[in-house]
Amino acid sequence: MRATTNPELTAAWATVPDVAKAQERHEAAVRLRREFRPGKSPADAVAGVQRDAQAEFLESGKWPADFTRRVGKAHTEAVAWEAEALALRGLEDSTKATAEHLRESLSADVLEHLDGRLTEILDTAKSAGDALGGVTSAEQAIEAGADALDAWRSLTSLVSDYSNVRAAQWDVLRAVTLSDEQSRMRTWRAQGHGEIKGVRVDAIPAFVVDGIRSGAYDVEFLVWVAQSDAGYVPTSYDDLEAEVAASTDPVSYDDHGPLIDLSPRVMPERQPRPAQVYTHSSTPHLDASQPAPAKPKANASAPDREPSTTDYF
C-alpha cells in the first residue's frame, strides 16, 4: 500500500487498520536504517588502528604504548555498530514481509468494501438513469430541464465516484499479485474483463468494452452498467480468473469427441471355400494296420514357383 489521492482507495484500506499499522512500522524501520550513523565493520576498524600505529612508528620511531587499548576500543565500538546495523536491516526486512503478508491476506476485505461501494453507486445511478428519459447528452438534459437535468448532474458526479472505485480495484489487485499475474490482468482488462460479471464479453456493447479498456467512463457507460445489474468487483485474482473463464469458454464440453454409432452391423454370410487338392496331394495314412487310403481327387493345380538364381546358373 502506498500514499494515494484516491479517496475510495484510502477509505477501503482504512477498513483494515492492521495493514496501515504494519505499513507505518515498515516505513519507520526504513527511516531508522537510512538515518543510522555511518560506521565500520570490526575488521575495518582494527585495520585502521593498525595503519595509524604503523604511521606513528614511521614518523617517530616509537610504537604506540596504548596500541592494545586502541584496538580493543575500536573493535568493541565496531562490533556494537555492526550489530545495530544488522538488526536494523533485519527489522526493515521483517516489517516489509509482515506488511506484504497482511496486505495479501486482507486484500479480500478491501475488495469486498469496494464492491459494496460499487453497489451503492450503481443503485443510485440506476434510479437517475431511469429519470433521464432517453437523454444522452448534457445539451439534451438542459433542454429537457427539471428531473432530467437533475439526473444528469447526479450521474456526472457518480461517474467520478465510479472511476475512483475502479481505479482502487485495479490498484489493490496489482498490489497483491505477481508480475506474471499482473501481465495477465492487463490483457484481460484490454479484452473487457474485470468489471462486468455474468455476461459474455462478445455480448457487451463496444462502448462499454472501450470504457473498461481505457478507464475513461462517462454517463452512458455508467447507466448501462447500472441497468445491466452486472457490475461487480473481483475479490481476488482467482475470482477474476474464474470470471474470465466463465465469460469466454464454451458453456459445455465434450471430453470424448463426437458420438460414434456402435450398434451391431449385419454382415452377409460368408460362403465356405472348398479345400484345394493338388495332383501331388495324398491322404494321410494314420493307421498302419489299415490299408492305405485312396489318393484324393485333384481339384486345383499348383502354380509355377517363382524362378530363382539356381534356374540360371
Image: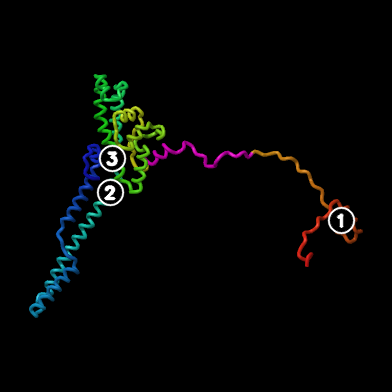
Which comes sooner in the sequence, label 1 or label 3?
3
Which is nearer the eye, 83 or 206? 206
Which is nearer the eye, 213 or 275? 213
- Numbered tag placed on residue 110 in the rendering: 3
In the displayed image of the protein, which residue is found farthest to the front?
312
| Real-space CA distance between mark 2 and mark 3, rounded to the nearest whole angstrom | 14 Å
Instruction: Report the side of 138 relative to 78 (left or right).
Output: right
Residue 149 at x, y = what percent?
A: 25, 22
| Residue at the disc numbered 1 | 279
Magenta residues (range): 239-262
Could you tell me which quadrant the C terminus lies in?
bottom right
Residue at point 43% right, 38% down? 248
| Real-space CA distance between mark 1 and mark 3, rounded to the nearest whole angstrom | 99 Å
Q: Residues within 10 Å of mark 2 (few under 14, many from 20)?
A: some
Which comes sooner in the sequence, label 2 or label 3?
2
Residue at point 82% right, 48% down? 274
Q: Residues within 10 Å of mark 1 (few under 14, many from 20)?
A: few
Residue 249 is one of the magenta-drawn residues: yes
| Real-space CA distance between mark 2 and mark 1, rounded to the nearest whole angstrom | 97 Å
Q: Secondary structure at mark 3?
A: helix
Residue at point 19% right, 60% down? 85
